[in-house]
């Protein structure tokens, strides 16, 4: 058993999550599963199984995730209310990740309603957050604002912990509407929230987002300077593998008519981002463009 597991009660298995490494997280969950089942709480045991399914979905093993969730569904009862909410969330997430949004949305809506009725603020906000992702246009933003309202009104620290991500989502909604000024305002709010909570990773992503919004407002030089600062900080921390920062530096250089200088950054961006399974499945044209620009073909 790892040191992390020794410090974590079986009932607190959610603390074992590492969303950036779902395979390792699945292994930890499976290792702790006998201990969770030994607690004699069917609801808790089924909750853990929904999280194993989530790990499988994040690894794009969608068929395996559905099989795991089928087993959970067969064992749900009136006494396993939280597990039912989490089952609905993970079934919805699995459909959403495999581009089956029409199947995902009603599951998230049911999870939202059940969580609100049960006073499960954290899971209610999660459901609204997923509805924002699965829905489109203004409806998506409506759900995001519902999520923000629920989180801000909650006394649950975990529910309020969603706020940084939710502010970020609203920023990206406006970004996709090409309202880069409003997007920047929400990204600043996101950055400030993460700074207040001493969460460096979220803060740095928000800084990157702000600079990206600057570039698309025609402020490429300011954007370049900020992205170069980020890259310098990442290198100092031994994290010279952020393809998104390299991509933005390249885009800024291109916007400043410095195409030759941009190519090494496009090349590095392609090297890193082309290994991302989600981008492979959903952003193939973007990856192809990075490769072309790295060669000077555009």
Image: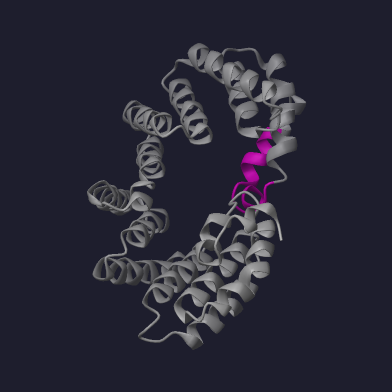
| Residue 214 vertical placement versus 73 (above, below) | above
| Side of 285 relative to 268 (left or right) | left
Q: Quadrant of residue 245?
A: top right
Q: Where is residue 284 in the image (x, y as percent from the top left)?
A: 65, 47
| Residue 179 vertical placement versus 48 (above, below) | above
**Front-lying residue, 130 or 126:** 126
Q: Can residue 35 be seen in this view?
A: yes
Q: Is residue 297 visible?
A: no
Q: Where is residue 201 in the image (x, y as percent from the top left)?
A: 53, 34
The figure's colour scheme reads one colour
**Front-lying residue, 185 or 9:** 9
Q: Position of residue 116 (x, y in %)?
A: 26, 66
Residue at x-position 55% and y-position 16%: 224
Q: Is residue 224 magenta?
A: no
Quadrant where the N terminus is found in the figure = bottom right
The segment highlighted magenta reads 276-290
Residue at x-position 37% and y-position 37%: 171
Q: In which quarter of the image is residue 246?
A: top right
Residue at x-position 73% and y-position 29%: 268
Q: Main secondary structure of the magenta part?
A: helix
**Front-lying residue, 160 or 213:** 160
């Amino acid at each position: 058993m790892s040191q992390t597991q020794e410090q974590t009660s079986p009932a607190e298995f959610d603390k074992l999550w590492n969303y950036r490494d779902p395979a390792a997280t699945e292994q930890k969950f499976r290792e702790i599963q006998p201990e969770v089942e030994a607690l004699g709480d069917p609801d808790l045991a089924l909750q853990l199984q929904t999280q194993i399914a989530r790990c499988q979905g994040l690894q794009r093993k969608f068929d395996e995730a559905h099989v795991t969730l089928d087993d959970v569904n067969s064992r749900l009862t009136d006494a396993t209310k939280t597990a039912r909410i989490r089952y609905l969330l993970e079934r919805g997430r699995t459909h959403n990740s495999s581009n089956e949004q029409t199947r995902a949305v009603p599951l998230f809506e049911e999870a939202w309603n059940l969580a609100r009725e049960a006073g499960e603020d954290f899971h209610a906000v999660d459901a609204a957050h997923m509805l924002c992702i699965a829905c489109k246009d203004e409806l998506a933003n409506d759900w995001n604002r519902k999520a923000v309202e629920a989180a801000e009104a909650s006394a649950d620290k975990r529910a309020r912990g969603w706020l940084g991500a939710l502010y970020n989502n609203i920023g990206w909604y406006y970004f996709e509407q090409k309202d880069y000024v409003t997007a920047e305002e929400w990204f600043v709010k996101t950055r400030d929230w993460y700074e207040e909570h001493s969460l460096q990773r979220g803060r740095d992503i928000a800084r990157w987002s702000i600079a990206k919004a600057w570039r698309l407002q025609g402020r490429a030089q300011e954007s370049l300077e900020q992205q170069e600062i980020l890259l310098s900080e990442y290198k100092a921390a031994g994290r010279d593998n952020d393809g998104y920062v390299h991509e933005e530096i390249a885009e800024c250089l291109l916007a400043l008519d410095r195409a030759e200088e941009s190519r090494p950054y496009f090349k590095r961006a392609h090297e890193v981002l082309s290994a991302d399974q989600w981008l492979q499945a959903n952003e193939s044209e973007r990856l192809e463009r990075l490769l072309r620009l790295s060669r000077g073909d555009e």
